[in-house]
Every structure is written in structure tokens, then in C-alpha cells.
Image (spheres, helix red, strand yellow):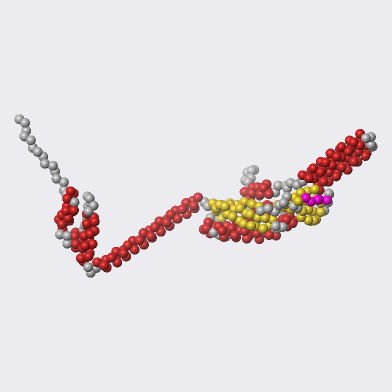
Amino acid sequence: MKKNRETNPTDTRRESFQNIFGASQPQHISAPGIAIATVFIVGGVAAAIALDLAGAAEIWSVVVALVLVMIGLTFLYSLRVASPWEKAVVLRLGHFKALAGPGPFWLMPVIDTATTWIDQRVMVTPFSAEKTLTRDTVPVDVDAVLFWVVWDAEKAALEVENYRVAIAWAAQTALREVIGQKPLSDILVGRAKMDAELQQIIDERTTPWGITVQSVELRDIVIPQDLEDAMSRQAQAERERQARVILGESEKQIAGSFADASQAYLNNPTALHLRAMNMLFEGLKERGALVIVPSSAVDTMNLGGLSGMVSLAQNLHPETGPAREPERKLEPEQP
């Protein structure tokens, strides 16, 4: 048996959530409370020294010093200041008393405690679903981001243990649920619809906690590499098919145009001959052009056979006639 167990990814994600959201909250010791407490403590020590130098009884010096120090510690503990975006949940002897803040507020020593400080700004929580199967059994990795805000600080503090961790897990489970209900094509194309569905599902789960979801946005969708290559080849084949269809439609239109043109020459052979001769002339007037005409077309156009074509070409371009060999001058041989 193996002594070392493999790490569970779920446990790893749970620990990461707790490290991010489950850290202990600061005590929110206020700067005014620290200043007032410092003044009283220093004053108590100074008063004790002054009484001792004045020759007063030692008991009075100790009592005065203790009283002033206790007043300073009371201000240090009881005087709290909440930021403009914060609400403090105040409990008195274990029962909910009130929401305090923003601004300064006072806690009764010993009986009052500010257990939770709620941030009411818009919060951003990234979450993801790894290797989640779609409805057509394709594993995908999806990253998303959640925008939410606490609208009821009392419920967020009393109805759920740690509202930050709870909303992160609720968002992740909702994402996995939505992915499992949709095929891959709907996930890739319908991001806006998927965002709206996720927002509705998560909002229904977090409303009892005093939290509302403002929006959910998918950041990235990663599919297997082999499937991505297959989809690329499919898209390329579809583009080639469309190109062939367009080419066939063009050929069909050209054939229709030729059929319409043939109707004009059907009962007018003279016009057909003139058009054929014009086409032949256009082909021969280029210098050094070579035109191959079927013999049936030559007979139809009554051009007088191949000799007539050659003569016509020579009349158009005399310089393009057959090349002659230069004459050689024979000189008598020397004896």
C-alpha cells in the first residue's frame, strides 16, 4: 500500500478559497481611540509621579494611575470608526443589536462586540470549472468572473458562516450545472445567454444571504486541442464547399448568357459569320499571336480553308511571315 495519498483537486481549491476569503478580519482599532487612550495612559503615569513627588499616599497614586489607564483602554476598545463602504454587526451578550457605521460608533465595554465587518462595495470573484463535460460529452475548461454586492449586511453576517466563500462555491457549482446542460456549440456561440442563465441561478441562491449578483461574464473557454484542429478542418472544408457552389452558380449564369446570345444568331447566319470573323481578327491582330480554329468552324465561316487564314495573317502583319535563310555567297577556292 502507498503511504502518500494523492492530493485531491477539490481539497486544493477549498484551501485556496479559505486562504483568499476565510482570513480573520481586522479588529478595526480606530486612530482616534488610540490617540485618546495614549493621552489617558500617559496622563495616568504622569499623575502618579506627580502625586508621589507631592508626598501623597502611595495608594492614591496607584488608584489615580489605574483609573486613567482604564479610561484610556475603554476608549481604545469602545471607540470604533467604520469606513464609508462598511457596516459593523454589533452583538450584545450574543444577540444581534444593530448595524453600525459608516463613521464613529461606541461599543459598551464587555457586553458589546463587533463580530463582523461587511464590505458593501461591488465585489469581484473569479471562478472556473475544469474538465467539465458538456451535454455532448466534451471536456471543457471555462473561466468566468462574478460581480456581486451585499445589500443586507445583517443577513450576510447571520445567515451564512462565510459569505465570500459561500458565493464562490455557489458560482462554481452553477457554472458546472449550466455546462452539463448545454452542447459545446451552444457554449461557444451563446455566451450572452449563458451569462444571463448563470446570473439568474447564482442570484437565486445568494438572495437569502442578502447578496445580489449584478453580472456574470465568461472570460475564456478552452476545448481539447484535437477537437480544435477538427473544428478548424471542418470550417475550412465548409469554406471550400461554398466556393465551389459559388463557382457552379457563376458557370450556370454564364451558360444562360450564352444561350440567350445564341438565340440572336439562330436565324441570322450573316451576323454569326461577322461575329466569328471579328473574334478571329481580334485574336490575330496581336503580334506573334497563334490562333487554333477547328476545321468545322472554318468551313462554317467560309474562310476558304487554311490557306485563307495564313494569307489573312500575312496581310495583317507582313513582318511576321516565315523567316528565310540568308543567301550564302560562294567564293572561289584558292589553288
In the rendered image, the residue lying farthest to the bottom is 267
Horizontal and vertical percent position of residue 324? 14, 45
In front of the other: 139 or 113: 113
Q: Is residue 103 visible?
A: yes
Q: Is residue 93 left or right of residue 191?
A: right
Q: Is residue 186 left or right of residue 244?
A: right
Horizontal and vertical percent position of residue 257? 31, 64
Q: Is residue 191 left or right of residue 99?
A: left
* 324 lies above or below 199: above
Q: Main secondary structure of the magenta part?
A: strand
Q: Residue 200 falls in which quadrant of the image?
A: bottom right
The question of residue 92 being in magenta is answered with no
Q: Residue 29 falls in which quadrant of the image?
A: top right
Q: Is residue 250 left or right of residue 168?
A: left
Residue at 22% in and 53% down: 285
Q: Is residue 135 visible?
A: no
Magenta stretch, residue numbers: 104-108
Residue at 75% in and 47% down: 28
**Which quadrant of the rendered structure holds the C terminus?**
top left
* 205 lies above or below 20: below
Horizontal and vertical percent position of residue 280? 22, 57
In front of the other: 182 or 203: 203
